[in-house]
Image (cartoon, rainbow, N blue to C red):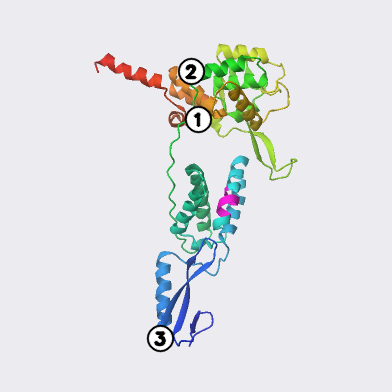
Amino acid sequence: MARKGENIFKRKDGRWEARYIKGYELSGKIRYGFCYGKTYKEAKEKVTRCRAALLAGTPVPVAHNRHRFAFFCQEWLRLEKGRVKESTYGKYDTILTKHILPKLGGCFPLGITTQLAEQFKQELLGEGLSAKTVRDILTVLRSILKYTASQFSSIFPTVAITYPKEQKKEARVLDLEEQKRLVAYLQTDMDECKFGVLLALLTGLRIGELCALRWENISLKNRSLHVTATMQRLRDYEGTGDGKTKVTIGRPKSDTSIRTIPLTESAVRLCGEFDPHCPAAFLLTGTEHFMEPRQLQKRLARYTKECGLEGVHFHTIRHTFATRCVEAGFELKSLSEILGHADTSITLNRYVHSSMEMKRENMDKLEAVGL
């Protein structure tokens, strides 16, 4: 005779039906499996075998933990808040809110499988997200699953996550003619902002580092520039500003980003012309009022448009600086430290772009050895 809670009952056609939890959909909705038998005993034996087979592979949710995946996502994010920078926390929060919670938040954790993770990845790619963005989302998902597994006393299923391959996109670098054109434009009726862009072209500064740079960070006597901070616009979680976001000035992206950059003689002369003799003044304005990164991006877009350059972003300036340094024969370790990289491989793989002229010069060296 069927017992209460077994989910086994007799049908109108005289057969016995046994129901069991087979899995979960992305929405969290339970997917049931069904077994049939001519007798109660036969149906129970069949459903017992099916449940055992599932437990041997992917466990089903147990009674002691009925939280949905969204609960563990929020707990993970709460713990991360005290461990990571504010900008990183904002990135995690955005990934959760826009991608993970809408698609996976309603699932039961033990119902998340390798197949479900693959389906999630394909949906993200189908929405037109770049491979890099999808990799970032999956990296966060992997961390949350690791945390979730630690909260279960039972064995948590292994969820294999495969990352989409990124197609390497060649960064935009100004050639020598384009660089000369931009420099000539910046030197015409130069103001503090144009001066700042030109200084970035001479030092490889990041946009946030340039916006946060004050005159107290520049030593004309020692011919050096000291990077100690970066500026970002972040989501205002505390509600301290007038809108949803706020501008913050804090430590650079890594410890190696805190660095001292030697200045060329031309850069020192340039700084001498614009020095407001106020250590607290921001370099881009000459006053104690700053210019934020998105304002600078708009200025740069106007500058490049007026001098006939296309596809130029602020990071193009940094890539161009690095490329000119390589062409001038810079020692790689020195260049890596000037750019604020933790490893020379980052400099080599991301910022070193050989021009056709440089490639041709190296090919011509083969003639010297008789090839």
On screen, residue 130 above or below 51: above
Nearest the viewer among 88 and 146 is 88
Q: Position of residue 97 (x, y in %)?
A: 60, 51
User: Which residue is at a point 57% across and 12% down the rendered structure image?
Assistant: 266
Extent of the magenta region = 95-101
Tell me whether circle 2 and circle 1 mark residues in contact (CB < 8 Å): no
Q: Position of residue 86 (x, y in %)?
A: 63, 41
Mark 2 and mark 1 lie on one chain; the one further toward the N terminus is 2
Task: Count neighbours of disc 3 (C-alpha within 10 A) and say few if under 14, some if 14 to 19, many if 20 or more.
Answer: few
As helix, strand or loop, the secondary structure at mark 3 comes to loop
Nearest the viewer among 241 and 154 is 241
| Residue kind at label 2, given as amino acid type | Leu
Q: Position of residue 75 (x, y in %)?
A: 60, 54
Answer with the quarter of the image where residue 362 lies: top left
Q: Is residue 86 visible?
A: yes
Instruction: Identify residue for label 2.
Output: 176
Mark closer to the observer (1, 3): 3
Instruction: Identify residue for label 3.
Output: 38
User: Which residue is at a point 46% across and 81% down the rendered structure image?
Assistant: 17
On screen, residue 45 above or below 314: below
Q: CA distance from mark 2 to mark 3?
A: 84 Å
Instruction: Identify residue for label 1.
Output: 341
| Residue kind at label 1, given as amino acid type | His
Mark 2 and mark 3 lie on one chain; the one further toward the N terminus is 3
Q: Is residue 215 left or right of residue 43?
A: right
Tell me whether circle 2 and circle 3 mark residues in contact (CB < 8 Å): no
